[in-house]
């Protein structure tokens, strides 16, 4: 079961990262906001997609499980903070490199992906929630 969940999570995560990255780069490119705010908006845009895709496809919750939304919001608030902080830290360390933005994005995304999978598996969409509804 965990192998299937992890495989689907990686597909959903890849799509989520694509949404995040395209939103982030578009906002930076247009100059509508500073890089940290653009990173946060990109992350939150991907989050909307990730909630529904992971709920239904990855973890098999066809119906809304009580409390899953607030647990998801709490998890993503934590991982958003980690994502933005890691991104900013990497940018500060890698600023001389021409690919600093891309490398920082990938590192921040990797950190938040690990935190997100563990949090969704053990906290947001935990198996006991399905059993409680049965």
Image (cartoon, rainbow, N blue to C red):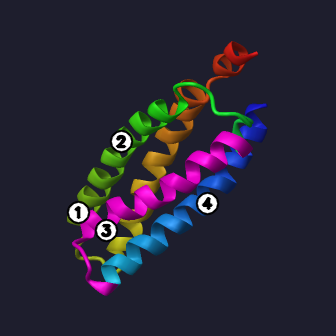
Q: Residues within 10 Å of mark 2 (few under 14, many from 20)?
A: few
Residue 2 visible? The answer is: yes
| Quarter of the image where the N terminus is located | top right
- The residue under label 2 is 77
- The residue under label 1 is 93
- The residue under label 4 is 14
| Highlighted magenta segment, given as a residue range | 30-57
Residue 12, position as x, y percentages in the image: 65, 54
Query: Residue drawn 48% across and 74% down?
Result: 22
Per the rendering, the mark at residue 113 is: none
* Mark closest to the chain's N terminus, 3 or 4: 4
Q: CA distance from mark 3 to mark 4?
A: 19 Å
Query: Residue drawn 54% across and 30% down?
Result: 68
Q: Residues within 10 Å of mark 4 (few under 14, many from 20)?
A: some
Q: Is residue 38 above or below residue 40?
A: below
Q: Nearer the viewer, mark 3 or mark 4?
A: 3
């Amino acid at each position: 079961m965990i192998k299937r969940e992890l495989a689907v999570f990686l597909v959903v995560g890849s799509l989520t990262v694509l949404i995040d990255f395209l939103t982030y780069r578009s906002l930076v490119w247009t100059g509508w906001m500073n890089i940290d705010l653009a990173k946060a908006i990109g992350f939150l845009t991907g989050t909307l997609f990730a909630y529904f895709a992971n709920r239904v496809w990855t973890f098999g919750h066809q119906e809304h499980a009580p409390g899953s939304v607030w647990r998801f919001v709490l998890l993503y608030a934590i991982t958003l903070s980690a994502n933005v902080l890691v991104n900013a830290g990497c940018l500060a360390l890698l600023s001389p490199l021409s690919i600093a933005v891309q490398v920082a994005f990938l590192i921040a995304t990797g950190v938040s992906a690990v935190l997100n999978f563990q949090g969704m598996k053990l906290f947001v969409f935990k198996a006991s929630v399905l059993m409680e509804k049965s």
